[in-house]
Image (cartoon, grey):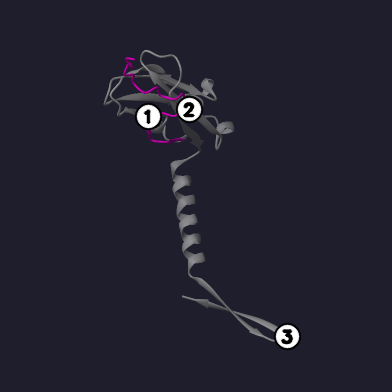
Amino acid sequence: MHQQKRQPELVEGNLPVFVFPTELIFYADDQSTHKQVLTLYNPYEFALKFKVLCTTPNKYVVVDAAGAVKPQCCMDIVIRHRDVRSCHYGVIDKFRLQVSEQSQRKALGRKEVVATLLPSAKEQQKEEEEKRIKEHLSESLFFEQSFQPGLITMAILRT
């Protein structure tokens, strides 16, 4: 009996998808951040079709929301935030990049990218600095407990 050699079937949804960055942060007060780029990489030996989906498509414009990436190439996908009102501050939106083989309909893999609108880059930097200082302070407090029957005492040692 003659056996035919077949290419292994790719299981739907299991193909790793390589996208950078994995998080988009838009700042309302900095117009240069209202347009950002996602790069989709194709490290495979076959072409990929892709589609970009979004949880809130009315807030974003995705340039080239569908297309193809040649084998061992990459594609830049431009995403513009078009609704920077304060009611959207801190809301986490998601983009899903679905990929499939050029000749197939079924999705072979997907990757989600989160997007957040913040009021100000300066405020974000200030919050991060405050968080870093608090973490540093919490790391430099050491507590010593001594136990005596019927009495518990606590001493604080600072470095």
Rounded to the nearest whole Å, what is the CA distance between mark 3 and mark 2? 60 Å
The picture quadrant where one finds residue 75 is top left
**Vertical relation: 9 (above or below) 121:** above
User: Tag 3's secondary structure?
Assistant: loop
Asked if residue 103 can be seen in this view, the reply is: yes
Say which element carries label 1. strand
| Residue 148 sits in quarter | bottom right
Mark 3: few, some, or many residues within 10 Å (few <14, many ≥20)? few
Magenta stretch secondary structure, dominant: loop
* Chain-order first, disc 3 or disc 2: 2
- Answer yes or no: do the residues labelled 3 and 2 have beta carbons within 8 Å? no
The one of 6 and 143 positioned closer to us in this rendering: 6
Q: Which residues are magenta?
A: 1-26
User: x, y percentage for residue 130?
Assistant: 49, 56
Q: For marks 3 and 1, give the CA distance.
A: 63 Å
Disc on res. 150: 3
Image point 35% across, 15% down: which residue? 102
Total tally of numbered discs in the picture: 3
Three-letter code, disc 3: Gly
- The label number, if any, that marks residue 95 in the structure image: 2
Q: Which mark, residue 38?
A: 1
Q: Amino acid at mark 2?
A: Phe
How far from the left and from the top, in percent, is residue 49?
Answer: 37, 18
Q: Nearer the viewer, mark 3 or mark 1?
A: 3
Q: Nearer the viewer, mark 3 or mark 2?
A: 3
Circle nearer the N terminus (1, 2): 1
Q: Are marks 1 and 2 in contact (CB under 8 Å)?
A: yes
Secondary structure of the residue carrying tag 2 is strand
Graded by Cα atoms within 10 Å as few (under 14), some (14 to 19) or many (20 or more), the crowding at tag 1 reads: some
Q: Nearer the viewer, residue 129 or 65?
A: 65
